[in-house]
Image: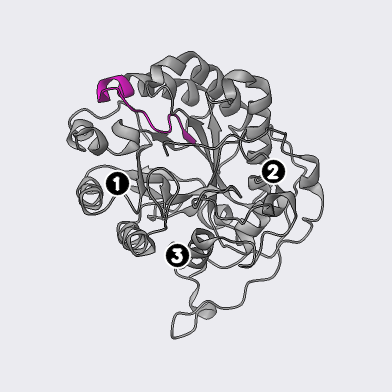
């Protein structure tokens, strides 16, 4: 996304992680991701009652051997993910579509990623993952590397205890040249990849929305950062941003052929695509459908409004997009898991100061749309 609000920054409270999670009810598989077991599905294909509660050891340290994911959770069902052909596949080698939410910048909405909100995302919304958007500039990582790294660690630990997958997003936006932040990226990923290397649920997004630079520059950055991650974590999936705000170059007059003709020299990677449904329509959908024949794609950010993140929601276009991604088994997360004034925020103003994130009373129009889609 191209514009962000600025709000006061505070820490995410890890201490709350251990309270109240002794027995979390974990729902059955997502309708767009997996079919539920035959005994749990009615002839009409409707969702059955949730399975018995599962427990998670939320106090397990990030280092060493992490606690097992709660029974029935996304991580329990799918295990370690990998890229197979053009698809994201589970531990059994079966294509899987992950569906989830992206946070807003950790400095802008520090209270919206917390144990209560993530528990609601998993058990009430029935999402598979959360994307943790750590801005590098705009009051982010460069101002306090240790503090923002700690917030990312806390979010990973919180989500992991629930059995959610986590996309750690190195949120490069302004400047759009990722090489400007190469040293910061190396330092950040060396530390967090080593700390979470034993986990099977973390994916690494190394540059959110490169812009104003050519594909060769983005490729060079990727081929310098990916080995840093691989040195600590050789098996996790890495997401590589594409030209023109992760539009496969479309927003800057190019297309996917620059990637297909000169792919990143690395294994187990996917290329990101971002769209905003009120601004990006047939041209972008045609590009994704065509590119998905030869490139493994991951929609790590989309919105139901314009690319500004504000304005009226175009839910018809958003539905067309998500139907396409379902058919192609392309994973996605929606922007943003926040309670700001813009229409991209899924929560009503003030929600993140409380503890109730379930149901529809706390949701905006875009929030109701995505929760319904995830539960469908």
Q: Badge 1 is on which residue?
A: 86
Estimate the x, y position of residue 320 in percent, counting from the top left.
Answer: 31, 62
**Horizontal side, residue 323 vs residue 262: left or right:** right
- The residue at the point 35 percent across, 34 percent down is 245
- Residue 34 is labelled as 3
Q: What's drawn in magenta, residue-wise?
A: 204-219
Up the image or down, 276 lies above or below 322; here it is above
Residue at mark 2 to residue at mark 1: CA–CA distance: 36 Å
Residue at image coords 58%, 32%? 197
Q: Relative to 102, does residue 365 appear above or below in the rendering?
A: below
* Residue furthest bottom as drawn: 43
SS at badge 2: loop
Q: In which quarter of the image is the N terminus?
A: top left
Mark 1, other Cα within 10 Å: few <14 / some 14–19 / many ≥20: some
| Callout 3: SS | loop
Q: Are marks 2 and 3 in contact (CB under 8 Å)?
A: no
Where is residue 167 drawn, in percent x and y? 51, 40
Left or right? Give the position of 374 relative to 241: right
- The mark lying in front, picked from 2 and 3, is 2
Look at the image and tell me whether residue 366 can be seen. yes
Residue under numbered circle 2: 111
Q: Is residue 321 left or right of residue 232?
A: left
């Amino acid at each position: 996304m191209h514009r962000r609000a600025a709000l006061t920054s505070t820490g995410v409270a890890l201490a709350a992680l251990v309270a109240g999670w002794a027995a979390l009810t974990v729902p059955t598989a997502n309708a767009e991701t997996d079919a539920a077991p035959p005994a749990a599905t009615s002839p009409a294909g409707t969702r059955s009652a949730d399975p018995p509660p599962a427990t998670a050891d939320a106090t397990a340290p990030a280092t060493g051997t992490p606690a097992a994911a709660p029974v029935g959770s996304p991580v329990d069902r799918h295990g370690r993910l990998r890229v197979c052909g053009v698809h994201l596949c589970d531990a059994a080698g079966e294509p899987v579509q992950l569906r989830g939410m992206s946070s807003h910048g950790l400095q802008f909405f520090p209270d919206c990623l917390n144990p209560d909100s993530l528990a609601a995302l998993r058990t009430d919304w029935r999402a598979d993952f959360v994307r943790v958007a750590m801005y590098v500039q705009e009051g982010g990582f460069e101002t306090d590397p240790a503090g923002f790294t700690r917030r990312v660690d806390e979010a990973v630990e919180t989500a992991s205890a629930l059995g959610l997958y986590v996309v750690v997003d190195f949120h490069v936006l302004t400047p759009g040249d990722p090489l400007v932040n190469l040293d910061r990226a190396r330092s950040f990923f060396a530390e967090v990849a080593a700390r979470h290397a034993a986990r099977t649920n973390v994916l690494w997004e190394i540059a959110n929305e490169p812009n104003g630079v050519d594909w060769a520059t983005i490729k060079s950055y990727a081929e310098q950062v990916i080995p840093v991650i691989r040195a600590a974590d050789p098996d996790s999936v890495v997401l590589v941003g594409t030209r023109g705000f992760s539009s496969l170059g479309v927003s800057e007059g190019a297309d996917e052929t620059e990637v297909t003709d000169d792919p990143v020299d690395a294994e187990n990677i996917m290329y990101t695509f971002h769209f905003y449904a009120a601004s990006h329509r047939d041209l972008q959908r045609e590009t994704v459908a065509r590119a998905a024949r030869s490139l493994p794609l991951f929609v790590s950010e989309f919105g139901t409004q314009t690319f500004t993140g504000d304005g009226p929601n175009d839910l018809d276009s958003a539905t067309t997009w998500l139907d396409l991604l379902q058919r192609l088994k392309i994973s996605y997360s929606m922007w943003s898991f926040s309670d700001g004034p813009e229409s991209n925020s899924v929560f009503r103003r003030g929600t993140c100061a409380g503890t109730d994130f379930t149901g529809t009373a706390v949701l905006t129009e875009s929030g109701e749309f995505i929760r319904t889609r995830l539960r469908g």
